[in-house]
Image: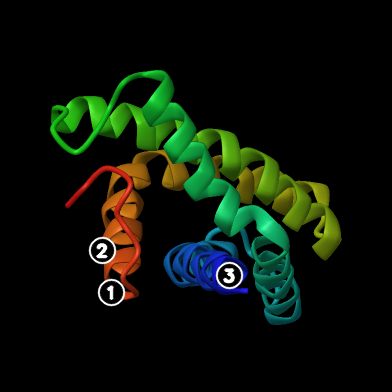
Amino acid sequence: YELSKIKLEEYLVDTSSRILFYVPAIGVWEKFVAGMENEEVLKSRGMAVLVNAVGVGKLHTLCRKYLAKLTKTDENSSPRRKSVVDFASGLIVGLSSYSAVLYLADVSLQEGLTAMPFAMTFTCLSGNIYGRFNDWYRQKFNFPPILNK
């Protein structure tokens, strides 16, 4: 019972971390640059919360762990090496999850084509910032960080 409780808590921490970091920022872009109507932004951000809640939030952390292990990157690695791991995990998880969000939110093709490049750029370029945020957030709930102590 204790192990399943810890796994659920860790899942909730990783999921809420990704929701808190990405959902608001991408919503601002959707509204003011992609030109989505308020209802579309609310639907998109709601779908983003849903997509993250069904596993993408945790998947991002697992992807970071896997890529770190694959590349032998740890907390003692150079900032550049950590950035590559975070960039790659952001690209992998961001592309698949945001595509699903746009599809489920039923946004127009034009709005999707405007929103997608920013979301991917933001997800990739902020990968290291998110990685540090995720590690800090995990520590606040007594879970070990992935790359940054």
Check whether the beta carbons of the residues at disc 1 and disc 2 lie within 8 A of each other: yes
Residue shown at 57% from the left, 55% from the top: 58
Residue at the extreme top: 71
Q: On the rendered structure, is 59 left or right of 126?
A: right
Check whether the beta carbons of the residues at disc 3 and disc 1 lie within 8 A of each other: no
Q: Quadrant of residue 77?
A: top left
Residue bearing the label numbered 2: 136
Q: Nearer the viewer, residue 125 or 130?
A: 130
Q: Residue type at mark 2?
A: Trp
Q: Nearer the viewer, mark 3 or mark 1?
A: 1
Residue bearing the label numbered 3: 31
Q: Residue type at mark 1?
A: Lys
Q: Nearer the viewer, residue 30 or 104?
A: 104
Label 3 sits on a secondary structure element that is helix
Q: Position of residue 72 (x, y in %)?
A: 31, 21
Give the mark, 3 or 2, whose residue is nearer the N terminus: 3
